Each structure stands twice: as structure tokens, then as C-alpha cells.
Image (cartoon, rainbow, N blue to C red):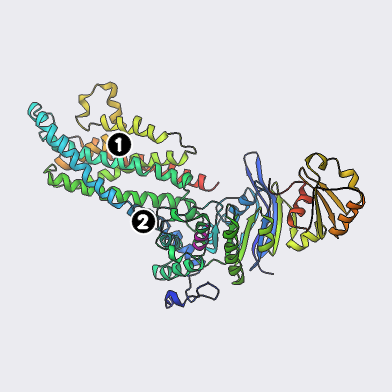
Amino acid sequence: MTEQPSPSVADAGGRGPSVLRAHSPAVSAARARRWGAFYYAEQVLRVMKSYGWTIVMYGVGQPVAYLFAMGVGLATLVDTSSEGVFGGVSYLAFIAPALLISAAVMTAANEFTFPVMDGFKWRRVYYGPHASPLTPEQIAAGHIMAVTLRFLLQSAIYFAVVALFGASPSGWGWVSVLVATLAGLSFGLPLMAYAASIKEDKGQFAMVMRFIVTPLFLFSGTFFPLDSLPLVVRWIGWISPIWHGTELGRVFSYGYDESPLLTMLHIVFLVGLAVAGWLLTKRQFVRRLGQ
Amino acid sequence: MQYVITAENLTKTYGDVTAVDGISFSVPAGEAFGLLGPNGAGKSTTMKMIGGVSQRTSGSLSIMGLDPESHGPEVRAHLGVVPQQDNLDEELRVRDNLLVYGRYFGLPMSYLRPKADELLEFAQLTDKAKSKVDALSGGMKRRLTIARSLINEPRILLLDEPTTGLDPQARHILWDRLFRLKEQGVTLILTTHYMDEAEQLCDRLIVVDKGRIMAEGSPASLIREYSTREVLELRFGSERNATIGAELEGIGERLETLPDRVLIYAHDGEAALEQVSARGLRPVTSLVRRSSLEDVFLRLTGRSLVD
């Protein structure tokens, strides 16, 4: 790196040659090929920082509110009348992993919808980096990396609150932070691929919230075990990243007794959905930005 | 001569629509090269292919000796791009827009911080450094977009309709900044549908219509080749304009009848006007002016540039 002059040395009108020198285009390209996704993630994080307080407040406020309302308030009724139903743990411990997973999925439903539409259509923010050495795949990956970081941070705060409520008896409870992040991606990436395919906003995202996110939240064994539902609606849980994530979270946070095969199935399902979502997203980004 | 851009038989189709239909051109280093044509002529599509963001359907294209199809990041690392629609990060502050963009080129903060200040000075936005982007006027946003495109010190700058939507004063400020870049040896590639912009900024240009090149040359040589030195514009009122042609026969070298006026192409406009008066014709208004690229375009396509 050459010595840096103070800004005042640079000619005011930009007429004369500046002492500052950028590295060569070849270096730019080589760095972008290697680190491009991180460069774009940095941009998304900077934008997130401008509403950073909302993220933190949401991250802390939501678990506190839910845990009080459900885990403490509702639990006084549930715990006295349903001994044994929740595998020997309190109602609070039963729903805590479910709330943690659901919160990550809700965040995914926000971060992978409107911002994607903004990138392609409204303010076309993807097109700026697209003209730089970054590739469409890297732009998609950078966006995902930044949101993943948000999942981790938010879930870590959530878990800290859960732990303060004493609702995570097992020493492995912290793993549910990773499970929540995985569940967020497994729900969010297919949704991101869909958002990237939308050309015209006709309220599709509101429909996703109403007819996909809400039913999944309610029928994924969140507030009661899935097998207490009739078979007619139980399938909603089986295809739900929230259910798979929640069951997995329960295994780690209070040693929920399920067959190891089923535990493996949860992991395979969540990873599989995330990978499929990533492949579709990548294809959609390449296709749409390359037009 | 050393060419920084060479296009041969460049073609782009979208389904059944052929946006760019086999165009060929070369641009030497340091030239200000323009693509002039009406909306939908294929200018922006050509720019996207040069910019390495849109794949061509056929033909060959080389930017700094590299094929953008196989070396997209390498090609784009050479370029500065000012798109037709601003796509600044509205949620970030003015100066942060420059820093973030520089990061896409892997440039270190130790370079970017002073460089951003230098570019804000160049774009006359120093006192707006900490403002939010959405608080800027259209002209300021355009200048910020140009500043952003210069963060990697590109030797080639692509400008797609750089002054569309700006008021005359903002356009002149922008042109001045582009002149300075040209003086520094930056190759400028710009599309425009404004003749005055093309005449002001371009050393050489191609006139494009329906995806094809209609003519190529410097603004002056195109005017010499396709038009006369002067033009006499006559208005007889919308009803007579259409029928007066026959009575003007023989005056000047060529006659063009438009809905709102009649154009007489002549070497000496005043002399042509005297001939019109001598025939006892009394136009409502008359104007003698120098030929412009608008006349070239009219001659080549039979249509005017701005509808």
C-alpha cells in the first residue's frame, strides 16, 4: 500500500492526478472472486445497522412477551391439568424451543421477502453491486450470510432469555440457537427463491404470511404436541420446518425422548430444504440479473 | 490503434424480439464514444453487454482484451458504470454509499476513506456527506452515482442516459464533470437521446435505430455528410404545413415536412428565406439555424429523435 495523503492534498476539482491509487483491476477481480459474498454481506449488515435497535428490541422483547404470556401465564392452567403430557417438563420448557424456532422463521419471512423485492424491483439495490465485479450468486449468498448472522444473534438473545426463565434444563440447550438458524434458512431460502421470481407485487407476501407462516406456526406442535391433532391436519407439521426445528430443539433443550432416526430425519429435512432453496435462489438470481 | 472495446456483429434477442441486431464498432482509449438513438433503439442493451451484466446472443465482444462472458468480474473491475436508473443505497448515508461500493472491488478502507472525500469534492457533495440519500435532489443523486462509479479509478466509464430527467443547470454541471474526466484520459461510453449532449460530449458516435447502426462518425462529419450547413424552419400553421411542399419546390437542397413545421435544408438559410418571400409565401414564423444531429437522425430514419 502506498502512503496515504490527507484529503486536502487531493486537488479540489479532481483535475490533477490524485496521489491516492486504487489497486489494479486484476487485483479487484481476484479479491471479488474470492471474497465477493462477504463484501455484499457487509453492505446488508450496514443497512441492517440503520435499523439495528429494532432488531435488538424485537430480539429481546418478543421472547420476554411470549414467555410471560404462554410460559408463565397460560402455564398456570396447563401445568395443573396436564401432568405428563409434555414429557415430564413444565409447559414453559415445552414451548420455549418452539418459540425460539418460530421467531427465527418469522424473521426469515421478513428478511427474505420485501428486501429481495427491493433488490430487484423497488429500489433495485442489487443492480449496483451487479455492475461491480460481484456475481449474482455472490449477491444472493451475501444477502443470506447477513441474514444468517441476524438469525444467530437474535436466537442467541432469545436463548439467553429462555435460560434466564430457567426453561432450558439440559446443558445442550444452546444448540437450539443453531437449530433455529437452520430452521430459518430452511424456511427462508425457498421463500427467497420465490421472492426473487416475483415481477409484480400483488400482495403475495401478505398471502405467504397469512396462509403459510401462520398455519405453520399454529400446527407445528408449537403449543401442544403434534400427535394431539387429528391426522387430517397433522401433515402440516410433517412438512413444516417449524415442527422439525422445534422437535430438534426439544431434544437439545430438555432431552425430549424421540427415536434417533427421527432426530436424523429432522436434520436431513431442514438441511435438504435449505440446500434446495439455495440452489433455486441462485438460479433465479443469475437468470434475473443477467437479463 | 489500441482499442479498449471491440464489438463485432453483436446481437441480443429476447424471445422473438431482436434488441440489438448485429452491430460492430471499436473504441480507442481515451475517446468519448456515443450511442445516439431514440428510446428502444437497443442502446441500453448494448451498454449492459459492454458492462458484462447481460450475455450476448451472438457475435463477439472484447473489453480490455477480455470476453465479458468468460471474464465477467475481470471486465467489470475495469469499468465504472452509471446506470439509467439510480440504484443508490437509500438507507445509507451519502459517503457510506461510496465506501460500500468500493468494498465490492476489495479496496481497503485506508484507500476508500480519503478517496470518498476526494470524490465528494469532485461531485460537489462535500457538505452532503452525512445526508441520507433520499434527501438529495435528482441532479445530486446523479452526481453521487457518478462519484460512486469512480471509486475504483476506472479507465472506462459507461454512462447510460446520464442527464435524462435533469434540469438544464444540473445537466451543465454534470457535463462539466464529464469533461474533466475526459481530460484525465478516461474513456467515456455514453448513450443519449439528446442531440446537444451527443454534440457536446462525443468525439465520435454511432446513430442507432431498431438495433442497427445507421451511421458512424464525429458529430461534425455526420452533419456534413447527412445534412446541409444550415436549416430554414418555417411554420405555416398546422393545416398548411402539409400542403405547402409543392409551392416550396426547388428552394434549398432538400425539404422535410413535419406536422408542426417545414424544414428546408440549404447551404445558406437566409438566401433560402429570401426565395420563399420572393414567391409571395408568408410563413407565420421562420428561423435559420445550423444543422444538428437531430437533422442527421431525421434524414437517416425519417423520424425525429424525441417523440
Tell whether A30 sits left or right of B281. left
- Mark 2 is on which residue type? Arg
- In the foreground, A39 or A72: A72
Report x, y in % for residue A128: 48, 54
Q: Name the residue under label 2.
A: A46
Which of the two discs, 2 and 1, sits closer to the camera? 2
Label disc, if present, on residue A90 of the rendered structure? none
Tell whether A211 sits left or right of B221. left
* Principal secondary structure, stretch drawn in magenta: helix
- Tell me how far mark 2 sits from mark 1, CA to CA: 29 Å
User: Could you say which quadrant of the image residue A108 lies in?
Assistant: top left
Tell whether B137 sits left or right of A188. right
State the residue at coordinates (57%, 59%).
B170
Q: Name the residue under label 1.
A: A241
Report x, y in % for residue A247: 22, 36
- In the foreground, B91 or A146: B91
- Mark 1 is on which residue type? Pro
Q: In which quarter of the image is the N terminus of chain B?
A: bottom right
Q: Do the residues labelled 2 and 1 touch (CB within 8 Å)?
A: no
Residue A217, compared with residue B229, is above or below; it is above
Is residue A256 among the parts visible in the rendering?
Answer: no
Neighbour tally class for label 2: few under 14, some 14-19, many 20 plus, Cα within 10 Å: some
Magenta-drawn segment:
B142-147
Is residue B269 among the parts visible in the rendering?
Answer: yes
* Secondary structure beneath label 1: helix
